Image: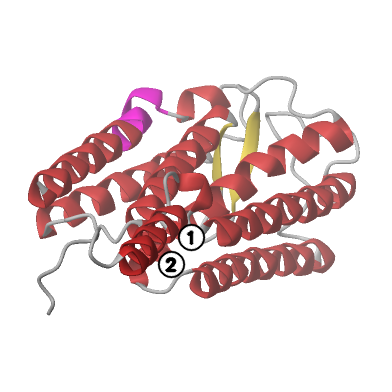
Amino acid sequence: MYGGSGQDHPGLAQGTEEALMETERVQPKGFTICPVTRGLIALAALSIAFGYIEASVVVYLRAIFYPDGFVFPLAEFGIETSPLWRRLLLTEIGREASTLVLIISGAYLFGRNVRERVAGFMIIFGIWDIFYYVWLKVLVDWPDSIMDWDILFLIPVTWASPVLAPVLISIVMIVFGLVVVRQSCYGQSMRISAVDWVGFSGAGVLAVVVFCLGSRGIMEPGYQSYFHWPLFLISPVVTVALFIKCLLRSSKSTE
């Protein structure tokens, strides 16, 4: 009864063929039609808008703290003697902490699991950071070049470096995040060992340390010598190498 061919049951064969065609139609043939794409578009919009908010706040801060211009070496503005300056500084530190909370919250809402949420955080942070400089260029025509120095962060201490350094980190974060999301979209996962996690963590800590060391001389004429490019570049190079290794390991395990 069930051993006949499709020719014995033309209606059944036609229905089966149509079902297969429908299945092929809805299967993702590329990253652009992955169901997560809409979430990525929302993340990008959030990050670009958030970059504008960040840039607009910095425009106000520079007008308050550096009315004569934001140039390195930075001038002192009496933070230790003026209660007003101290209060404004504490307010800015609170704003930066709130920024991290918002980015983490957006990443949490984007992802369905820890892997996707970490990827979402990297994407939001990277786009936000890059468009922060894009919007500053639009608003106040700064920076003049990617080698201009900037104050990056105030938690737990001041971070400072040329603009190029955080932009490089942001590009790496965006690429990593997109790759992880693409894998998740196709039901794949990256295999990361404990040793890999130690490597990623060490590279991240190294970058933070270099940024913090870069702030030590921001009020001195030789401020540029405080940022150690060779030491900094170890961080993205090691991170990319570890990421590629994890990708290759994951691809071999799926073969």
| Residue drawn at point x = 83 percent, y = 45 percent | 62
| Residue drawn at point x = 71 percent, y = 49 percent | 48
Of residues 87 and 187, the one nearer the viewer is: 187
Give the residue at mark 2. Answer: 117
Q: Position of residue 254 (x, y in %)?
A: 13, 51
| Residue drawn at point x = 75 percent, y = 21 percent | 144
Q: Secondary structure at mark 1?
A: helix
- Tag 1: amino acid: Gly
Residue neighbourhood size for the residue with mark 2, other residues' Cα within 10 Å, grouped as few (<14), some (14–19), many (≥20): many
Q: Which mark is residue 102?
A: none
Q: Quadrant of the N terminus?
A: bottom left
Is residue 242 shown left or right of residue 112?
A: left
Residue neighbourhood size for the residue with mark 1, other residues' Cα within 10 Å, grouped as few (<14), some (14–19), many (≥20): many
Cα separation between marks 2 and 1:
5 Å
Instruction: Find out whether residue 244 is within the magenta segment.
Output: no
Which color scheme did the rendering employ for the protein? secondary structure
Q: Which residues are magenta?
A: 228-235
Is residue 123 shown left or right of residue 50?
A: left
Q: Position of residue 13 (x, y in %)?
A: 31, 62
Q: Secondary structure at mark 2?
A: helix
Q: As displayed, is residue 233 above or below residue 177?
A: above
Q: Position of residue 85 (x, y in %)?
A: 80, 61
**Whether label 2 touches label 1, CB < 8 Å:** yes
Main secondary-structure element of the magenta-colored stretch: helix
Q: Position of residue 27 (x, y in %)?
A: 40, 56
Residue 176, quarter of the rendered image: top left
- Tag 2: amino acid: Arg
Of residues 196 and 14, the one nearer the viewer is: 14
Q: Which mark is residue 120?
A: 1
Instruction: Find out whether residue 233 is within the magenta segment.
Output: yes
